[in-house]
Image (cartoon, rainbow, N blue to C red):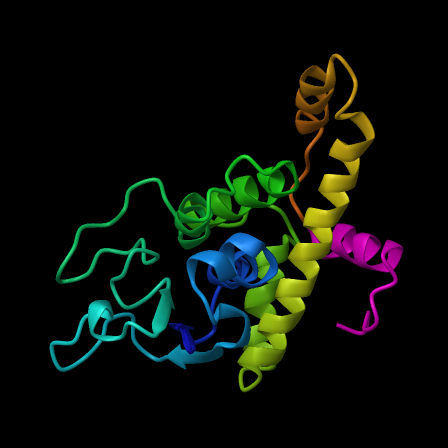
């Protein structure tokens, strides 16, 4: 039974969306029973101390830290998982890579995690700014990030639902993908507002 989720202090969009996948998709609870109510803690370092490994904590899922299966970083005990980020590792574990609503999210988070933000007001950069301003409220920022990216997922799913029964659905989906733009705070606000999100003050 999973009772804890652990990530690093001031987690990035990468780790926070990984948590969203674990908590908002049925596959998360099926694979990791208890994950829905697991408490999230925030490490100040990326590696465990006193010779411990992630395997010493069977009740804990580590995201982007701890050297476990969802930590893409190189540690003293393992090489870096090349061309992966925390969220892509979680998506593969939960077999969610093919989810239409997640394709855009996974693409842009991985791109930002591996190469940095290139667009002003891109959502992962905004999350870093929130940490800089509200550094003591990791969980508040995490909840908002989870809500925001889940809303984007629902918005993308609605686009797929509108065309999925068409004979040329995949072709139309490919055409939509060619129009993708990085996720910004402005586009995210529009999505949240369209879904009547309760706290747009964020």
Question: Quadrant of residue 50 in the image?
Answer: bottom left
Image quarter (top left, top right, bottom left or bottom right) of the C terminus: bottom right
Span highlighted in magenta in the image: 184-202
Verify whether residue 33 appears in magenta. no
Query: Is residue 114 left or right of 16 when viewed as pictured?
Result: left
Locate residue 6 relative to residue 144 in the image: left or right. Answer: left
> Residue visible at 82% across and 31% down?
162
Residue 198 position by quadrant = bottom right
**Residue 56: x %, y % from top left:** 20, 74
Q: Quadrant of the N terminus?
A: bottom left
How many marks the image carries: the answer is 0
The foreground one among 30 and 163 is: 30
The residue lying at 54 percent from left, 70 percent from top is: 36
- Residue 117, horizontal then vertical, whole percent: 53, 49
Magenta span includes 188? yes
Q: Is residue 192 above or below residue 43?
A: above
Tell me the residue at 61%/60% (across/down): 24
Q: Is residue 10 visible?
A: yes
Residue at the bottom extreme?
Answer: 136
């Amino acid at each position: 039974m999973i009772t804890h989720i652990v990530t690093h202090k001031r987690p990035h969009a990468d780790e926070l969306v990984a948590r969203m996948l674990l908590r908002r998709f049925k596959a998360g609870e099926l694979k990791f029973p208890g994950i829905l109510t697991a408490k999230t803690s925030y490490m100040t370092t990326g590696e465990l101390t006193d010779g411990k490994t992630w395997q010493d904590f069977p009740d804990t899922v580590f995201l982007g830290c701890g050297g476990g299966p969802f930590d893409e970083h190189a540690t003293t005990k393992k090489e870096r998982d090349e061309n992966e980020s925390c969220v892509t590792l979680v998506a593969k574990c939960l077999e969610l890579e093919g989810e239409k609503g997640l394709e855009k999210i996974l693409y842009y988070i991985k791109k930002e995690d591996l190469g940095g933000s290139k667009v002003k007001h891109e959502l992962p950069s905004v999350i870093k700014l929130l940490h800089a301003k509200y550094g003591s409220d990791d969980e508040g920022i995490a909840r908002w990030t989870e809500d925001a990216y889940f809303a984007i997922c629902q918005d993308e799913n609605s686009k797929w639902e509108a065309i999925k029964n068409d004979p040329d659905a995949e072709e139309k989906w490919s055409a939509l993908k060619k129009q993708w733009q990085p996720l910004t705070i402005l586009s995210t606000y529009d999505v949240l507002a369209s879904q009547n999100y309760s706290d747009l003050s964020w």
